[in-house]
């Protein structure tokens, strides 16, 4: 990832300490009771999930810092994380006994840890301390229960740079400028209750000590601001004006109840409910709202702004445009509109629509300008409360002027100019030395992945132009959307690289291309990128020789041997996980692939594959995520697939049907209506659709429109143990797509 030192703006916190308690309050649970934040807590190969405690889409996000669920040591508790997998901001750790030059670390007992979205409790074995935490929007609240008659210490750490200040016996503050300069404050209480202020530069240790005769419970409430210390103080006064841990915990639980209960499921197993509701919880990890009382600080122009709507950051659009943003268009289009407007505002402030907009600015990870697809998808689904003209301006500027190079920001380079003129990103031959200094030394050119991804982005831009009657732009970008065809090598049956002379580079698409295949693909091999033409699936089918050949190739994907051992494969393709044949369930570009059988004469194979993949790769345990979850990117696939449908082509307001895990799913829509998927008798055995009805009318194709969903209604499925080989068969794909694109 890019260095965190790019963020220069000061972050402020205000912390208050006390020895008080409060009454408990009980709130009913519903779907929330099934959430298990430890699912996926051991990464298959790469990153584990984290048991994040936060309010939905809010910026205080806390978890015990350890390597993963199997790590038996907790190092500290962050006051908030900066971004998913990109580090934390400040940390605290309670301990007993004498102070030490080494930071305190403690073992923990997983049987004694309580982990929920709104509350964390864990026992520090080394010190016999119980740590509890509950979140507010811009605030957090720790409660530490120490053993009797012990010297009680709080270790405070700056995880980057910063300064702590002691204001009085109960109040401290800290600043962190992210500039690389380290400055720390040490504040400790003497036995008589007094304290001393000491500024220590270059050290990573600050302690607050309470005498052994003091009370056993220390409460620690704090607020975070990206504007000022004074604003942090206001945030604290607004959210936690009085002491009362359990009151804040009750409020947090109610906030999670509201979003969890928006989708009700009936039937299925408890294990399936745990997987489903945990996935739904993770869909609210980000983006996060950083607006503070009508103001926000933006590092996109390094200014504090007055705001009449909320400003959101922290999104990895390469992962989230596929399913997370489409899910939010169903569950909360008003917040989705605020998030899109945040993208537009970032464009106005920085000059580019961001790719991975995090707290400190755009982190130009991965490839593609998929915010274009995200914006089109929202617009066509009726989410229009954003500056559409300015959004289009930013989409077009990215397409015409920004570099396409992975992990790079800024204006186009010579490789982009070549793409504009010739219609493919030029690749190097194996062993050929890079000639363009701007190319990332690890991420490489990713020439095939870039050509395919930008073909989709340009299609989305063309469709947005069409929505507003811009015929010239429509024709220009629709032509560019066909650039993927330039890399189809018919004799090989794969999308393959070409050099700058237009000559094929004859590689092995399964294994060539260096680490992660990044010379030509990205994180996956040519089998995964064979299907990356979501915007023109009829065209892809024709390239492969028609529907039957397309179906046969899908069958081959799920059966094809790796051609080598798994350890050899994973040494080069660690993101290529959740393997079934050459299919990778553990990486986002694969999500739509099992649904492609709905374009063939065998839709029942989609039903079979989806059930198999959910059962095999998403169990309700610590190994329950087959790859990097990426803050809701993978979890949204679980939510959609478990409900029985999926947004196959973001940018077209249509869903394709799979096989629901539950006998009934009911979505409470923001407009007061409800949409239900009913599959009475549906079980692990009865997974095949026999017949279907949409609002009482027979449905013979495995598709329905967004309007069918958002206007409320019922999709009813008759399920059985064996496939109905005729249901959904015979869809005219060319007519289907032509109709969808002509009516929007």
Image: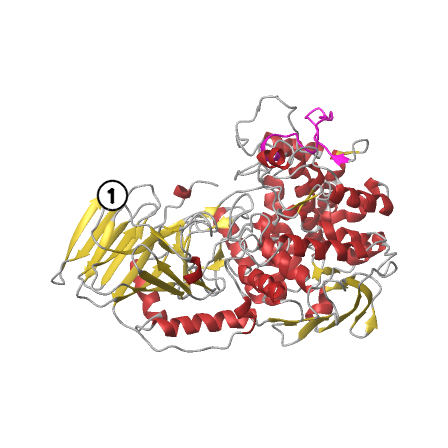
Q: Residue at x 41, y 78 (%)?
A: 25
Q: Residues within 10 Å of mark 1 (few under 14, many from 20)?
A: some
- Name the secondary structure under disc 1: loop
Q: Nearer the viewer, residue 487 or 40?
A: 40
Please say whether residue 242 is one of the residues in the magenta stretch: no
| Residue farthest along the left direction in this orientation | 192
In the rendered picture of this protein, how many numbered marks are placed on residues?
Answer: 1
> Residue 167, located in which quarter of the rendered image?
bottom left
Assign the C terminus to one quadrant of the image.
bottom right
Give the answer, above or below, for where 400 lies relative to 645. Answer: above
**Residue 644 picture location, percent across and down:** 71, 63
> Residue 527, located in which quarter of the rendered image?
top right
Give the answer, above or below, for where 239 lies relative to 285. Answer: below
Left or right, 490 with reference to 620: right
**Residue 195 picture location, percent across and down:** 15, 58
Left or right, 160 with reference to 585: left
Left or right, 641 with reference to 33: right
Q: Is residue 337 visible?
A: no
Left or right, 191 with reference to 682: left
- The residue where tag 1 is placed is 203
Give the answer, above or below, for where 651 lies relative to 568. Answer: below
**Residue 631 picture location, percent across and down:** 53, 54
Magenta range is: 494-517
């Amino acid at each position: 990832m890019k260095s965190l030192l790019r963020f220069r703006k000061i972050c402020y916190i205000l912390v208050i300490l006390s020895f008080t308690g409060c009454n408990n309050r009980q709130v009913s649970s519903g779907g929330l009771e099934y959430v298990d934040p430890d699912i996926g807590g051991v990464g298959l190969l790469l990153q584990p999930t984290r048991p994040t405690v936060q309010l939905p889409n809010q910026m205080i996000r806390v978890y015990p810092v350890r390597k993963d669920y199997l790590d038996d040591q907790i190092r500290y508790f962050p006051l908030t994380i900066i971004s998913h997998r990109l580090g934390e901001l400040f940390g605290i750790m309670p301990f007993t006994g004498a102070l030490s030059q080494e930071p305190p670390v403690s073992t923990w007992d997983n049987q004694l840890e309580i982990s929920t979205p709104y509350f964390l409790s864990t026992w520090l074995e080394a010190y016999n301390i119980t740590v509890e935490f509950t979140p507010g929007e811009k605030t957090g609240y720790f409660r530490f229960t120490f053993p009797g008659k012990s010297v009680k210490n709080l270790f405070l750490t700056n995880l980057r740079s910063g300064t702590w200040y002691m204001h009085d016996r109960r109040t401290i503050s800290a600043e962190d400028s992210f500039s690389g300069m380290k400055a720390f404050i040490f504040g400790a209480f003497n036995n008589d209750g007094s304290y001393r202020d000491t500024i220590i530069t270059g050290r990573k240790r600050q302690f607050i000590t309470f005498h052994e005769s003091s009370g056993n419970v220390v409460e620690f409430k704090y607020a975070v601001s990206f504007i000022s210390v004074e604003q942090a103080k206001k945030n604290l006064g607004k959210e936690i004006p009085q002491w009362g841990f359990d009151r804040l915990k009750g409020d947090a639980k109610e906030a999670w109840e509201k979003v969890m209960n928006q989708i009700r499921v009936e039937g299925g197993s408890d294990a399936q409910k745990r997987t489903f509701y945990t996935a739904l919880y993770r869909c609210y990890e980000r983006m996060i709202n950083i607006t503070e009382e009508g103001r926000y600080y933006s590092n996109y122009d390094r200014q504090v702004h007055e705001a009449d709507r909320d400003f959101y950051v922290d999104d990895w659009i390469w992962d989230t445009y596929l399913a997370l943003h489409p899910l939010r268009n169903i569950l909360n289009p008003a917040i989705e509109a605020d998030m899109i407007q945040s993208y537009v505002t970032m464009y106005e402030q920085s000059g580019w629509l961001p790719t991975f907009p995090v707290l400190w600015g755009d982190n130009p990870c991965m490839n593609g300008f998929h915010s274009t697809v995200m914006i089109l998808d929202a617009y066509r689904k009726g989410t229009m409360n954003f500056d559409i003209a300015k959004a289009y301006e930013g989409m077009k500027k990215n397409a015409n002027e920004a570099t396409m190079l992975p992990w790079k920001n800024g204006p186009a380079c010579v490789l982009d100019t070549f793409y504009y003129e010739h219609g493919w990103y030029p690749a190097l031959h194996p062993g050929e030395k890079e000639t363009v200094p701007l190319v990332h030394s690890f991420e490489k050119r990713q020439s095939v992945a870039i050509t395919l991804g930008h073909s989709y982005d340009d299609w989305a831009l063309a469709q947005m132009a069409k929505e507003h009657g811009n015929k010239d732009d429509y024709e220009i970008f629709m032509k560019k959307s066909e650039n993927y065809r330039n890399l189809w090598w018919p004799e090989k049956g794969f999308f393959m690289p070409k050099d700058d002379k237009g000559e094929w580079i004859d590689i092995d698409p399964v294994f060539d291309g260096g680490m992660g295949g990044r010379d030509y693909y990205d994180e996956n091999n040519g089998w995964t990128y064979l299907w990356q033409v979501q915007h023109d699936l009829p065209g892809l089918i024709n390239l492969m020789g028609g529907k039957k050949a397309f179906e046969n190739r899908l069958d081959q994907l799920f059966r094809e041997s790796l051609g080598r051992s798994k350890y050899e494969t994973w040494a080069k393709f660690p993101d290529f996980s959740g393997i079934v044949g050459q299919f990778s369930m553990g990486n986002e570009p694969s999500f739509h692939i099992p649904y492609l059988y709905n374009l063939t004469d065998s839709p029942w194979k989609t039903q079979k594959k989806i059930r198999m993949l959910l059962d095999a790769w998403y169990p309700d345990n610590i190994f329950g995520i087959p790859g990097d979850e990426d803050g809701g990117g993978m979890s949204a696939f679980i939510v959609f697939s478990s409900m029985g449908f999926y947004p196959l082509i973001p940018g077209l307001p249509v869903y394709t049907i799979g096989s629901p895990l539950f006998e009934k799913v009911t979505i409470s829509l923001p407009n007061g209506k409800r949409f239900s998927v009913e599959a009475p008798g549906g079980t692990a055995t009865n997974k095949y659709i026999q017949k279907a009805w949409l609002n009482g009318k027979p449905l013979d194709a495995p598709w329905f429109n967004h309007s069918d969903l958002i206007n409320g209604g019922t999709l009813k499925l008759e399920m059985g143990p064996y496939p109905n080989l005729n249901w959904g068969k015979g869809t005219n794909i060319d007519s289907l797509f032509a109709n969808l694109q002509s009516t929007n």
